[in-house]
Image: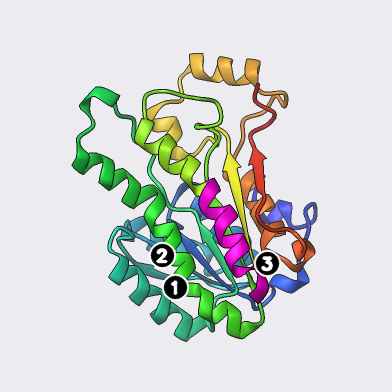
Amino acid sequence: MSLVEAKSRFARYPSLVDRPVLITGGGSGIGAGLVEHFADQGARVAFVDIAEQPSRALVEGLRDRARRVPRFAPCDLTDIAALRAAVADLSEATGPFQVLVNNAGNDDRHPFADVTPEYWDGRMAVNLRHQFFAAQAVFEGMKRAGGGSIINFSSTSWVMGEGGYAAYTTAKSGIIGLTRSLARDMGSDKVRVNAVLPGWIITERQRRLWFTPEAERETMERQALKHLLKPEDVARMVLFLAADDSLSVTGQSFIVDGGWV
């Protein structure tokens, strides 16, 4: 279903119109779906990503069909100084961010016996550490704006006890603890913090690396809902958590996995 077709079928959120939104890892996959949906809601969307070419192509592709054209800044999120600088620069153009979507991550597989301390630290940096520092960077602006919403991306991989990428699942489980703590720390300033746990969302990367006929059969066997999940399925949950419709929701985790058992 195209974004144009979805306009007449799915919710529109008046509170998101003109709202400054920052999305990390917005250049492709689930992140690109988030950028598209927030831009179509009329939000002032900015996003960062280390991959410049697909990110700039996304901006150009949305120029004629989104209600607002998103802003993009290249950024390596493992460089916290660069992340802080990008947040400051982008907020000059959009206004203080009232929504942060901590989407960026990397689910590379790794045999546990091969993991070095350096690799482990790198996986924490790319999957967990930047979520804390992005939240820290936007907090004062949210506080001045009278509140905000932070949505952290975890994963169902650690809930299911999957093997083959222990550093990734460790980071993704840690995001739940981070979410709960930040919700408590920020709640008195009307900043809400929630987590979204996607199941197997079939992006171009997933198709290229791991989506085989056998994997598709297993997905249809284990999901209660018998259709493949797409980035827009996650984006619609995130829109709700970003909008004022969820003003009393914080410290919670929301699974979008089609009912995987």
Identify the disc placed on residue 133.
2
Q: Are marks 1 and 3 in contact (CB under 8 Å)?
A: no
Q: Are marks 2 and 1 in contact (CB under 8 Å)?
A: yes
The quarter holding residue 82 reads bottom left
| Region rendered in magenta | 176-189
Query: As rendered, which of 122 and 27 lies closer to the eye?
Result: 122
Query: As rendered, which of 223 and 80 lies closer to the eye?
Result: 80
Q: Quadrant of the C terminus?
A: top right
Q: Which of the two marks, 3 or 2, is nearer to us in this view?
A: 2
Q: Magenta stretch: residue 188 in it?
A: yes
Q: Magenta stretch: residue 197 in it?
A: no
**Image side of residue 206 versus residue 108, left or right:** right
**What SS does tag 3 mark?**
loop
Q: Is residue 150 above or below residue 125?
A: below
Disc 1 to disc 3, how far (Cα)?
24 Å
Query: As rendered, which of 138 and 74 lies closer to the eye?
Result: 138
Where's residue 189, x and y in %?
Answer: 64, 76
Where's residue 119, x and y in %?
Answer: 23, 40
Question: Reading the chain from its start, which is encountered first: label 3 or label 2?
Answer: 3
Query: As rendered, which of 223 and 136 lies closer to the eye?
Result: 136
- What secondary structure is the stretch in magenta mostly built from? helix
Label 1, on which residue? 137
Res. 141 in view: yes
Disc 3 to disc 2, how far (Cα)?
27 Å
Question: Reading the chain from its start, which is encountered first: label 1 or label 3?
Answer: 3
Hey, what amino acid is under mark 1?
Ala
Hey, what amino acid is under mark 2?
Phe
Where's residue 198, x and y in %?
Answer: 58, 40
Hey, what amino acid is under mark 3?
Gln
Disc 2 to disc 1, how far (Cα)?
6 Å
Mark 2 crowd level (few <14, some 14–19, many ≥20, 10 Å Cα): some
